[in-house]
Image: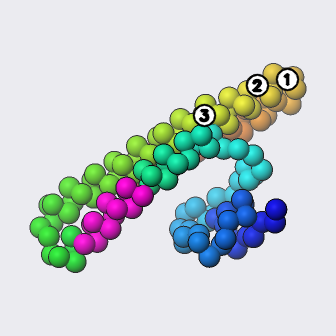
Amino acid sequence: MTTTKAGAGAPSDGTDVANVTEVTTATADVVTDHDHGVHGYHKQKDEHLKRLRRIEGQIRGLQRMVDEDVYCIDILTQVSASTKALQSFALQLLEEHLRHCVATAAIESSAQGALKGGDEIDAKVKEATQAIARMLRT
């Protein structure tokens, strides 16, 4: 299978780049080395996509509300609901990352010996901590 990449954020699974939505600057700067394996969210991928489509619908509803000159407070209420939905999604994804990626690093480190494997665990914990910090800033 060949992989087509069009810069940061392009899928690494061979997905047609034309079907990829625009990547924001914040995520385009993130460089990872995790394109080679199964991610923690893999088992719930369909559920996650369904949830993200619902959130997308909420955002489209916000656009419609602004277009129809709906009362400001009603729009803000929907913004809050959309924000909470994204935060909830992010927390679930983070939990899956900790259960899968960090746990895998811990298992592999015990197999490799604490010296070399400890670096991998530290890297995964640091990565998760940085993700939590980004979530808290929003």
The first of marks 1 and 3 along the sequence is 3
Question: Relative to residue 33, is residue 126 depicted above or below?
Answer: above
The answer to whether one can see residue 128 in this image is: no
Left/right of residue 81 with respect to residue 127 in the rendered view: left
The magenta span reads 53-64
Q: Amino acid at mark 1?
A: Ala
Q: Which residue is mark 3?
A: 98
The first of marks 3 and 2 along the sequence is 3
- Relative to the observer, which residue lies in front, 116 or 109? 109
Location of residue 106 (image quadrant): top right
Q: Residue at x 40, y 43 (%)?
A: 88
Q: Which residue is mark 2?
A: 107
- Relative to the observer, which residue lies in front, 22 or 134? 22
Crowdedness of circle 2 by 10 Å Cα count: few (<14), some, many (20+)?
A: few
Labels 1 and 2 touching (C-beta < 8 A) = yes
| Label 3 secondary element | helix
The answer to whether one can see residue 42 in this image is: yes
Query: Where in the figure is residue 40, as x and y percent of width and height?
Result: 63, 40
Q: CA distance from mark 3 to mark 2?
A: 13 Å
Q: Amino acid at mark 2?
A: Ile
Q: Amino acid at mark 3?
A: Leu
Q: Does the magenta run of residues contain 63?
A: yes
Q: Does the magenta run of residues contain 79?
A: no
Question: Relative to residue 56, is residue 91 depicted above or below?
Answer: above
Location of residue 26 (image quadrant): bottom right
Q: Residue at x 15, y 66 (%)?
A: 72
Q: CA distance from mark 1 to mark 3?
A: 19 Å
Question: Relative to residue 37, is residue 64 depicted above or below?
Answer: below
Q: Which residue is mark 1?
A: 111
